[in-house]
Amino acid sequence: MALKLSEKGQHEVTRILARYPEEQSAMMPLLHLIQEDKGFISITDQLELAKLLRVPPMKVRGVVEFYTMFRGEKCGKYLIQVCHTLSCAILGAHTVVDVIRQKLGIDIGGTTKDGMFTLMKVECLGSCGTAPVMQINDDYYENLTEEKIIEILDSLK
Ligand code: FES
């Protein structure tokens, strides 16, 4: 079995690999590509990527687990990551989580029945000056208030 991506994804794999003299240097862009193509990076894809890059599978697994931007499991179309580190905690991360929980009817780690939203708590998103902060897929939402959160979630439906 090989890494199975869409036709466009397969072309992109070849293009990315050609940019790096050492295969393993292509790990980060290829992980982004897999996630973009499939929505998450399954264990099977992690194993196939390890073979392709000629690295131990645990090396790929370690990278996927270390970076919160990578998803190792299937989740909703929108992955909501709420920072709960110090600045955000002081400025209301708990309220942010509660508002989302109530609005979407899911708990931390849960996905809505329609497959639209998954809620996660994460460590510092690097935007402490604009706390409280959440990230939805690749976008940051800062200085959150209850009204702002509701507005953001409604705009994504
Ligand atoms: S503490 Fe939340 S972004 Fe840094």
Image (cartoon, rainbow, N blue to C red):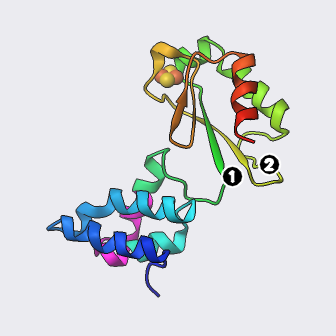
The local secondary structure at tag 2 comes to: loop
Provide residue 39's location: percent of width, then percent of height. Answer: 57, 60
Q: Amino acid at mark 2?
A: Thr
* Placement of the C terminus among the 4 image quadrants: top right
Q: Is residue 133 above or below residue 35?
A: above
Q: Where is mark 2, residue-wise?
A: 112
Could you say where residue 130 lies in the image, as x and y percent from the top left?
50, 15
Q: Are marks 1 and 2 in contact (CB under 8 Å)?
A: yes
Residue ID for mark 1 = 76
**Residue drawn at point x = 81 percent, y = 41 percent:** 106
Q: Earlier in the sequence, mark 1 or mark 2?
A: 1
Is 55 inside the magenta-drawn segment?
A: yes
Please identify the dominant SS of the magenta region. Answer: helix
The amino acid beneath tag 1 is Gly
Coordinates of residue 142 in the picture (x, y in percent): 55, 21
Where does the magenta region start and end?
A: 50-62
Q: Residues within 10 Å of mark 2 (few under 14, many from 20)?
A: some
